[in-house]
Image (spheres, rainbow, N blue to C red):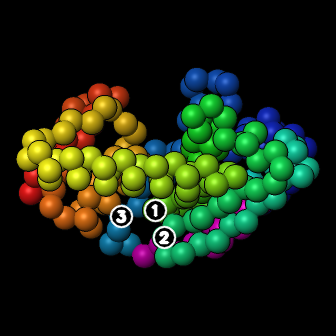
Amino acid sequence: MEKKTNLDDYLAGLGISDSADESPIDPETAYQSPSSPIEYNINPQEVVEQFLKGLCERVDSGLSVKVRMQENVIYADISGVHAAKMIGRDGRVLAALEVMCYTLLAKEAGRNDLRLHLDAAGFRRRHEDKLVQLAERIAQQVMKTGESFEMDPIPASDRRIIHMTLKEMGGVTTESVGEGKDRHIIVKPA
């Protein structure tokens, strides 16, 4: 992966621009049949690491990036005194960086089969811990009262954490209902 002089040049190289008629992913090559063997020549971990390190250098030279890959998940952690700059309000900057990393993986490494877990200053870890605690409290309430509990709409990644937590806990079942931004979880007694 070549080093670009600024972020705009880098994004333009990925096919990302202000122009609405440019598509960053070629629909002809975006999907390959699972029956055909796929050979990957570029290490996706290195692609993500180089991108995030370059971005962090431009934002704050005191930031550091650690990236590791386990099975089909790339874990990337941004740390440093001012790592909160990479989080943004309610994690919006972090979410945008994830989208950029997914686009980069598809464009540079030809990989759209990987999951990415991007964290900065422990934000995602703390957020996941809070979701697990919330799920456990709701499960206790549902088991105690025997009545279903309807949660407020939350993003898919948060719903997944709650579903997985309560599946392991037992005593309750979960169901996602609704469409789009109104999709939410209902926790019911088992």
Residue 60 falls inside the magenta stretch: no
Quarter placement of the C terminus: bottom left
Q: Which residue is mark 1?
A: 113
| Vertical arrangement, residue 76 with respect to residue 10, above or below | below
Describe residue 118's horizontal placement relative to residue 78 as left or right: left
Q: Secondary structure at mark 1?
A: loop
Disc 1 versus disc 2: nearer the observer: 2
Measured in 3D between alpha carbons, the distance from the residue under mark 2 to the one under mark 3, in whole angstroms, is 18 Å
Measured in 3D between alpha carbons, the distance from the residue under mark 1 to the one under mark 2, in whole angstroms, is 8 Å
Q: Is residue 108 visible?
A: no
Name the kind of residue labelled 2 in the image: Asn
Q: Position of residue 99 (x, y in %)?
A: 57, 44
Describe residue 160's horizontal placement relative to residue 30 as left or right: left
Magenta-highlighted residues: 37-50
Disc 3 versus disc 1: nearer the observer: 1
Measured in 3D between alpha carbons, the distance from the residue under mark 3 to the one under mark 1, in whole angstroms, is 12 Å
Q: Residue furthest front?
A: 144
Q: Residues within 10 Å of mark 2 (few under 14, many from 20)?
A: few
Q: Position of residue 127 (x, y in %)?
A: 51, 48
| CB within 8 Å, label 1 to label 2 | yes
Residue 38 falls inside the magenta stretch: yes
Describe residue 44's horizontal placement relative to residue 188 as left or right: right
Q: Secondary structure at mark 2?
A: loop
Q: Which residue is mark 3?
A: 33
Residue shown at the point (13%, 41%) measured from the top left: 148
Q: Residues within 10 Å of mark 3 (few under 14, many from 20)?
A: few
Q: Which residue is mark 2?
A: 72
Q: Position of residue 155 (x, y in %)?
A: 40, 39
Residue shown at the point (75%, 39%) measured from the top left: 85
Q: Which mark is residue 50?
A: none
Q: Residues within 10 Å of mark 1 (few under 14, many from 20)?
A: few
